[in-house]
Image: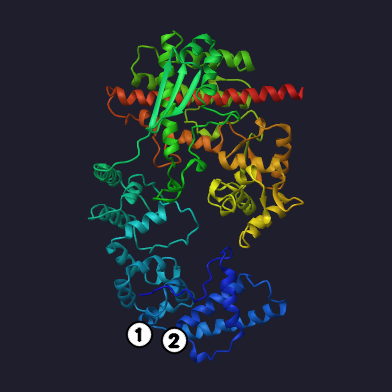
Amino acid sequence: MHEPNLKRIVFHSKQDMSAGNHLERAELILKSKVAKDDLDINDILERYHIKKYLDNGLYLKQWTSEEISAYKIKAEKYKIEIGNFFSKINSENIEKIYKTIPYNYIESFWEIVNNYKVHQRVSSNKLNEILGKEPILINNLLQFQGIVKHFDAALRKFLIDYEKSAEILLSIYEIKHDREIKKKILPNSLSVDDKENIILKYLDSDEPNLNYIGLIANAKHQNGFRLSPKTRLKAKQLNKKLIDKFFQNQKGLRYGVSVVFSEDAPSKVDVFMDDDHIANYCYSVQFIKENQETYRLFQNFRYLFDYIDEYGRITLLSKKSSLGVFERTLGLRSKNEYVGGTSFSLSEMTSQAQLAGYDKVLDDINVPLLNVLRDIYTLDFQTKYNFPDNARFSIPKAGHSAFEKIKILAPEFESSLKQFKLFVEDREIDFELLAISSMPLAIRDIPSLNESKYLYLNEINEKVGHYTRLLFSDQTLLAYVDPFKEKHYRSLFDLLANEEVGYKNYEEFSKPQINFLVESGLLELDKDSNIQMKNFYRIMILKDIYENEFGSFYHYSEAFQNEAKKMIVEKLIFAESSLFSKQEQSYFNYYLNKSEFTNSLDLRNSYLHGTQGKAENDEVHQSVYYMYLKLVVLAFLKIDDDLFIFNHMTKENV
């Protein structure tokens, strides 16, 4: 039933690469003379798709303006033929007609039914009959508002009974779609309670999909979709049960980290991956002992542990460029989820182990890490950058339990950010003013001393997406070209950076993409028709922002800054200013609250509202303590970088 017919013309989208082939077949029909009485439903639907091509301004290159005008006139006549045919469809014949159409015409059939109000001549009983035989059709019907509104009661009843309705609801409200999909519309009569009952029925079903259960457990309250804590807890418990069952007898790839601080380390840091896929880090205790000045100990988070890079960006973030192909494409993700991956998990394990080990080393040499952080904020920032000398950062005592340390550290961390915010705004810290506001501070609201600090790709500009995908994506076929295929270059950029690649090496279907990059001034052909990178500064800025998701303007050299300014004017990128970049804000929100992500660790709220578990569960609290300590370290590194940039720019402008 509904087998695809690949010989029929189908309009997919204006950007679809197969348009040329379909238009060549359309040309034959546009030139032919067919008696109207000889047209069946599939001929009518084919004409509907031909008209879509012309309505969207898609033509063959060889067509003259006269031919285009003639074809458009003919396509307008198709509209009349379509209307006449569908005007005869009703409850008596719709099922018989529908059965004869191929799979690739199902959506367009119901689109015309909706647009021409054919559904008003179809009974609810007939629709139920069709859906009963082909329940998956519901995914198409829910795209059309007229159909959904007309059959409101029937569709509500169907969705309540349909075993896959929960997956439809989650697709609408929760799932993050990597490509644009058509919006689904639900019957107005389907209540919030109906939707929760659908979810509960799914959780109780014999074979619920594990991917969807995870989405239910972290579902976010939205207009028209709210799940009770009991329902989310039920999903969470079922999710754990099914995961444990799945991995009970499975063998998988082992990976992890080992962090060692050694008196005998041959160098200050040594990193290697062993045969068991364990990342090993060995740090020299002797190096740390020889450099005990407070600021040097603090900067070890930059130079030894790589918490931030040379551009002042936090390196621990989850980035799209760090996700593997399978991590990007497999499974279902919530649009409200902080997306990690293997690389992110390793980074988190490593940073936690580095921090815990370093904390122990500093305790052993009688320079506690908490003391270092207190002195950085209240002494070193003042000495180096003229930060206000009344800045405060209180620390827990050494004898406190991890639970008690968190209770002190959490509000002090927030206070330090509020103090910095006041300094940026008023160039002083007024604690009376600080005391008046008891509202929690949103990470995004912490300003920077420096204007236009971060650079982002302007995703509204479609050209930017084309540039970055063609040059840097590991999914482009432009990197896979003879005679370099066996070298497996990751991207076109990597290929061009390492090889002399001739324009003639590319097949005809790939040359338009190369031409686009040449016409855009990013590539050029030399005298031998080899492809060369042209605007080096622009390409490298695009690459930096594509891979790291944001750039740091003040850490660019003057030549790169000048090019970035041109790109801002051309609306290829844009600049914004805050202490943390958007991606860094998301990282902090993932740890601290549920303002952005449903799978957040929610540390701030759980410890503020006492939902963190038993106070004597020291192993859990010790882990959370190091998480909080890491956030403090990262925030102070960002403040240090912001103050450094501001002082440097102030001196330059004097």
Dot 2 amino acid type: Lys
Residue at x 72%, y 40% (from the top left corner):
563
Left-right relation of 249 to 478: left
Residue at x 23%, y 55% (from the top left corner):
205
Which is more toward the observer, 154 or 402? 402
Q: How far across and how far down the image is residue 519, in percent?
A: 72, 55
Say whether residue 410 is visible: no
Q: How far across and how far down the image is residue 338, in percent?
A: 44, 41
Dot 1 amino acid type: Glu
What residue is shown with label 2? Answer: 88
| Cα–Cα span, label 1 and label 2 | 10 Å
Q: Which mark is residue 92?
A: 1
Q: Which element is circle 1 on?
A: loop
Q: Which element is circle 2 on?
A: loop
Left-right relation of 573 to 379: right
Q: How far across and how far down the image is residue 6, in percent?
A: 47, 73
Residue at x 38%, y 22% (from the top left corner):
407
Label 1 packing within 10 angstroms: few (<14), some (14-19), many (20+): few
Q: Which mark is residue 575?
A: none
Which is more toward the observer, 636 or 480? 480
Q: Are marks 1 and 2 in contact (CB under 8 Å)?
A: no
Residue at x 58%, y 89% (from the top left corner):
33
**Looking at the rendering, in which quadrant would you find the N terminus?**
bottom left
**Looking at the rendering, in which quadrant would you find the C terminus?**
top right
Q: How far across and how far down the image is residue 150, in percent?
A: 40, 72
Label 2 packing within 10 angstroms: few (<14), some (14-19), many (20+): few
